[in-house]
Image (spheres, rainbow, N blue to C red):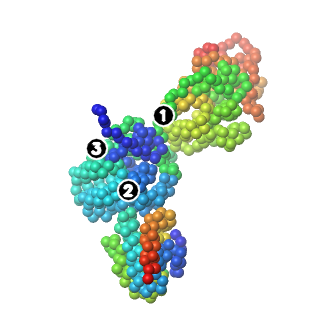
Amino acid sequence: MKNKVPIDCLHTGVPGLDDVLGGGLPEFSFNLIAGPPGSGKTTLAHQIMFALATPERPALYFTVLGEPPLKMLRYQQQFDFFDGQAINRSLRFINLSEETVQGGLEQVRQRIVAEVKTHSPALVFIDSFRSLNLVGNSEYGGDADFQQFVQQLGVLMTSWKATTFLIGEYIDDSSSNPVFTIADGLIWLRQTVQRNSVVRKLEIVKMRGRATVPGLHTFRIGDAGIVVFAPALGLAQRGGAAAAVTETRLSMGIARLDDMLGGGMPSGYSLLVAGPSGSGKSILAAAFLAEGVRVGQAGVFAAFERNPRRTLNGRIASLIDSGRIGVIENHASDLSIDEILSLLLREISRLDAKRVVIDSLSGFELAVAPSFRDDFRESLSRMVSALAVVGVTVIMTCELEDRYNDLRFSPYGTAFMTDSIIVQRYIEVGSRLRRLIAVVKVRDSAHSHELREFTIDESGIVIGDMLQNQEGLLGGQPSKKRTTDLIGLEIGTESA
Amino acid sequence: MRPLSSQRQHSDPMTAVLARRSGVDSDAVHVADAVISVWQDIVAVLQTIIGRQGVAALYDRSVSLASGTYPWLAASLSGPDNSLDLAALRSAIAGRSNEEAAAGSGELLQTFYDVLASLIGPALCDQLLSVVREGSVHTVHEIAKP
């Protein structure tokens, strides 16, 4: 149809929410914010109201029964978005408890009508709508009355061109509540508890006229209010077209390693550095970031180790302190991968970073809330894809238990999802532990297949030569060369 | 919440409002009229936001606290229907000496302000009651007229 009515979008002011709403909230829509107690409904409503309300676009916030308004004001002002100066200028709080208790739905409706006519609000919030539903089901009337009330309210708000939010305490979303049918938008907040972690999730169950992002989206409530973590890949794609993998190679900052990789790391690739504890994975990754800074490429370091700075040399620590390398440091145990990726992408964008290190996947897994661990591998894959889309070159370190009867690169099956793999091993020669490094894979590129010895000194990793006349290195206890097969080597089929 | 004092300072926000509305050296009846006008303004502003019950609860709490120093204020607790009994308050004030009427009224108003500020913070409290305070400026101007 030609000459379709344009539907303007309101930007909610809640980071990430517009993304999952498909761009924002349709103007004049009739919405329900639902969820169990403590799920953040009132906070979400306040955050949207303070973001949108202006003297020219005023808001009315009706409080019904439930949380006393004084308590609401007391707690909501703790958030950064709360602006006391806006009260009675851009927005008004109106308490309806008297009408609810004494007059029931009809008196509530009349008061709302009167206030809407007086103030001509562009935004109307009713908190909590659930208590009105209960009034509707009590001596004042039944379900039919409540349905009629909701319909009248919907008609009234539409004709007054007021974008409306009903905040309701609903636990069960399967009921055929008339509000759910009438509402244009239904935003459902949930929280799940597993072990000691609480994960908050938001779902846009419906939003007429918008192509919303389906599924459950994690969100967090902090001092600034609610932050929604939109799905990883979608966020990255919004940042621009997928970055093409170029022929450019990045230096690793470690002499001879670039040669082993066939001329450096292809730009935009992901690299898994696998090795046992203490083998030097973090040092290798730090060298990669330091080299980036040296050639003018900013980096981001996502630290999930207990004492990340202790594992880094002084040089990289000073680059972090000087702000030339961004750090995402989190030892919480209730993160979602979408949240971590969101933090990463923000930092990458802020610094225009080209290099990213995730140290380590083992720490990362511990930081992820238990409820996400079942999907860890899939989520990790999405994250690697999303980082590839923004064109950064990524190193992930991975703790590898040294087993000498087989060769694994990751307990998460990450080997298949990364473009390249470097493995570090310990071996015993002459009653001493020595370290080996090998490039196992560089996708679509020739690379060295040599097992090289390396040492770690104050300057970092120093790669030496192959151990001559030794064999069975991957078995951990090499011997002087003889005619036997290597043990259990399951590396795959790299052919330069 | 600041400690209650038996001698309120005129620098206290609500005591100052009352002083401006009632004028200097007013008799108890003038003080009673002025304080009722302030309470009517407060009710008008706050009842919309926190409901009649919310205002009555804060008022009763303030009366309870202030009547520790001025026991005669206890007669002005709000009624069972959650409405402030301003007539009872007016009678109580008007029946005291001029000095005691001013001091007790100021104490009650400032206690109310302190209780509210302790719940929602002084900044938001000032913001919500700004109409009451600005109204008092207007009254002062009128009082200053010959």
User: In terms of sequence position, does the residue under pointer 2 or pointer 1 come before the other?
Assistant: 2
Q: Chain of mark 3?
A: A
Q: Position of residue A425 (x, y in %)?
A: 68, 26
Q: Position of residue A365 (x, y in %)?
A: 55, 37
Q: Residues within 10 Å of mark 3 (few under 14, many from 20)?
A: few
The residue beneath circle 2 is: A61
- For residue A2, side relative to residue A39 (left or right): left
- Dividing the picture into quarters, in which one does residue A466 lie? top right
Q: Secondary structure at mark 2?
A: strand
Q: Chain of mark 1?
A: A
Q: Position of residue A476 (x, y in %)?
A: 69, 23
Residue shown at 68%/42% (left/top)? A322
- State the residue in front, A299 or A284: A299
Q: Position of residue A221 (x, y in %)?
A: 49, 49
Kindly report the distance in space between the C-alpha atoms of the residues bearing marks 2 and 1: 34 Å
Kindly report the distance in space between the C-alpha atoms of the residues bearing marks 2 and 3: 23 Å
Q: Check disc 3 and give the amino acid type.
A: Thr
| Quarter occupied by the C terminus of chain A | top right
Residue shown at 50%/66% (left/top)? B122
Q: Secondary structure at mark 1?
A: helix
Mark 3 and mark 1 in contact? Answer it, CB < 8 Å. no
Nearer to us: label 3 or label 1: 1
Q: Residue furthest bottom?
A: B97
Residue shown at 39%/76% (left/top)? B37
